[in-house]
Amino acid sequence: AAASHELRSPLAVLRSGAAAILSSPDKRELLQKTMDSECARMSRLIDDMLLLASADAKTWEVRLQKTDMDTLLIETYEAFLPACAEKQIRLELDLPEYPLPSILADPHRIRQILSVLLDNAISYTPAGRKIRICAFTREESKGHRYFSRSKSASGQLVLQVADQGRGIPDDQKSRVFER
């Protein structure tokens, strides 16, 4: 039921876009962008449904490989720029001056997580505000943790997505990981 509800919206946009192309060819480029955006949205929704199904079936797969985090973050940032521009939201990518360390991870899963966070941020951030993607390393020294933007940092890699949306109401926070 949730899937059919979510897929109806982009389908409605695609149908109206197709009708508009037939009636006014001069708006073809704008409609093409909208249709491409909605098709990408539907694709992400279907990917999310498949991910949920695999998690429910306990067939979740993680394929670890050496992952260049700078490239992954830049590609993710660039993929979400059009959606942010469309909603008049400024998207920022804050990377340290030094290259982030490559990590052993599943880049597809990291992109999925970032995409879910960015989709939600775009949905709940008002026009004129910003969303910020940030990456840095976290060091541990003598039992204390601190954040580092130095080239010599070798601890945990931290990724953040922060938005200027309304936030989750306090009475809903305990349900945030429920479907």
Image (tube, rainbow, N blue to C red):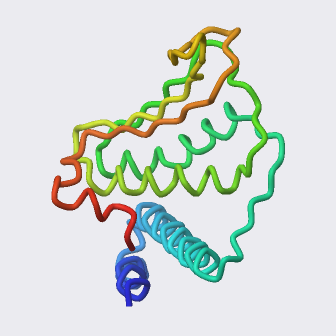
Q: How many marks overall?
A: 0
Hey, which quadrant is residue 178 in on the image?
Answer: bottom left
Q: In this view, does 75 lie to the left or right of 179?
A: right
Question: Residue 97: where, in percent of width, then height?
Answer: 61, 12
Question: Residue 110: where, in percent of width, then height?
Answer: 63, 50
Q: In this view, does 92 lie to the left or right of 123?
A: right
Above or below residue 34? Residue 57 is below
Question: Residue 123: where, in percent of width, then height?
Answer: 31, 57
Above or below residue 43? Residue 140 is above
Above or below residue 164? Residue 62 is below
Q: Identify which residue is drawn at 47% across, 57% down.
A: 116
- Relative depth, front residue between 9 and 6: 6
Above or below residue 153? Residue 110 is below
- Relative depth, front residue between 44 and 154: 154
Please identify the residue farthest to the right as the structure is shown: 65
The C terminus, quarter of image: bottom left
Q: Identify which residue is drawn at 70% across, 9% down.
A: 152
Q: Is residue 173 left or right of residue 179?
A: left
Q: Identify which residue is drawn at 40% across, 34% down.
A: 132
- Relative depth, front residue between 101 and 55: 55
The N terminus, quarter of image: bottom left
Hey, which quadrant is residue 34 in on the image?
Answer: bottom left
Question: Residue 55: where, in percent of width, then height?
Answer: 60, 74
Q: Is residue 164 left or right of residue 21?
A: left
Q: Identify which residue is drawn at 69% across, 35% down.
A: 69
